[in-house]
Amino acid sequence: MNAFATAFDLLLALSLLWSGARALTVTDLFRAVVLFIVFGLLMALAWARLAAPDIALAEAAIGAGLTGALLLDAVGHMRAHKRER
Amino acid sequence: MRPLMRLLVRLRILALEHLLLRGTVLIFSAAFGLLMGWAMLDLPAPAVQLAPLVQAHIADSGASHPVTAVLLNFRGYDTLLEIAVLLLAILGVLAARGNDPSGEHHMQDTPQPVLQLMTRGLTPLMVLVAGYLLWAGAFQPGGAFQASAVLAAGVVLLYLAGLLAAPPTPGPLLRVGLTSGFVVFVVIAAAALWQGALLQYPPAWAGALILIIEASLTFSVALILAGLFLWLPNEDEEAEE
């Protein structure tokens, strides 16, 4: 049981680092926003593993949900603006 | 030929500099990250043990979940200022948008039947979940912010599915709703000032006061969060006008 928990934590940490690095280095903005949402959800899992369920709820709702929606809105506006030009 | 060679040499030097800069930044951030990880594993024991202190006084606080007790009673002043910051954010968004109530209600114009059916089914459930999160915040993880996030997500979902037409600027009733959470919190804090210090709820009423504050906060913060999405300055509209 303990080995399973350690393996899960290690996998979670690695995927957090990987999705964060990919979100910063990918060139397509839409993909970057999707990776950011994925990072937010993985972060919520990490908070849950650290026994902080209130922060996990807030991270999932506001960090991944609301900020993701606002960023997608911004990407859409940028694309429309570019098309008008 | 000469200027071309000079240009090529300059470009190669720039590329090398760029690579060196990137390499240096990468090495420094990796070293910093590793040092932070090592420091986290090697923290000294904290000087003040806050968790037992909270547990000792939690019976007087009005909530049996320690996080809610700290957020709304022991450190209620911080929550009050957070709500003020959120209110300032939505005021900034509304100020950037301008005050033109004659504009049309804007709505998504490509209705999708499956999405609309699903949204109609989900919205009552979301309201129920938000109400439960608000109530359960007193004794388990939950509380006002989580409930308001669920409500805001419901409003945004209604708007995106084409079931809710967002007004161009909030009318007077919406404005009252946006500010009511902060106003209720300030009024209760000021009323506590008469009895003793600021935000010192009398222990007999602490549970009821916390519930009233949390309910008005849920309503208000849900409107603020949904408003941040609905009232972002829309460049397409300005271009059309």
Image: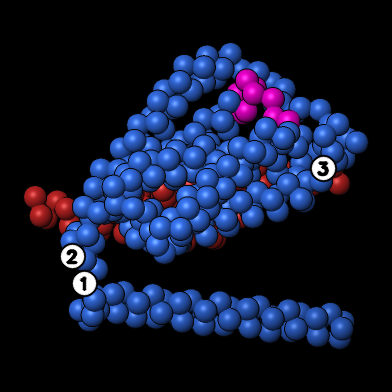
Give the labeled residue for mark 3: B99
Residue at image location 52% in from the left, 20% down from the top = B119
Rounded to the nearest angstrom, the CA distance separating label 2 from label 1 is: 6 Å
Marks 2 and 3 in Cβ contact (< 8 Å):
no
Return the residue nearer the eye: B87 or B59: B59
Looking at the image, tell me whether mark 3 or mark 1 is earlier in sequence order: 1
Q: Which chain is blue?
A: B
Amino acid beneath label 3? Asn
- Examine the image and state in which quarter residue B212 appears: top left
Q: Is residue B177 visible?
A: yes
Assess disc 3: are there few (<14), some (14-19) or many (≥20) residues with their C-alpha within 10 Å of its C-alpha: few
Is B58 magenta? The answer is no
Mark 3 secondary-structure assignment: loop
Marks 2 and 1 in Cβ contact (< 8 Å):
yes
**Which segment did they paint magenta?**
B159-167
Residue at image location 69% in from the left, 30% down from the top = B166
**Is B158 on the left-hand or right-hand side of B76?**
right
Residue furthest front in the image: B194
Q: Nearer the viewer, mark 2 or mark 3?
A: 2
Mark 1 secondary-structure assignment: loop
Amino acid beneath label 1? Gln
- Above or below, comparing residue B236 to residue B6 in the picture: above
Give the labeled residue for mark 2: B52
Is B162 magenta? The answer is yes
Return the residue nearer the eye: B134 or A67: B134
Tell me, for residue B214, which label it has, or none: none
- Above or below, comparing residue A26 to residue B107 in the picture: below
Give the labeled residue for mark 1: B49
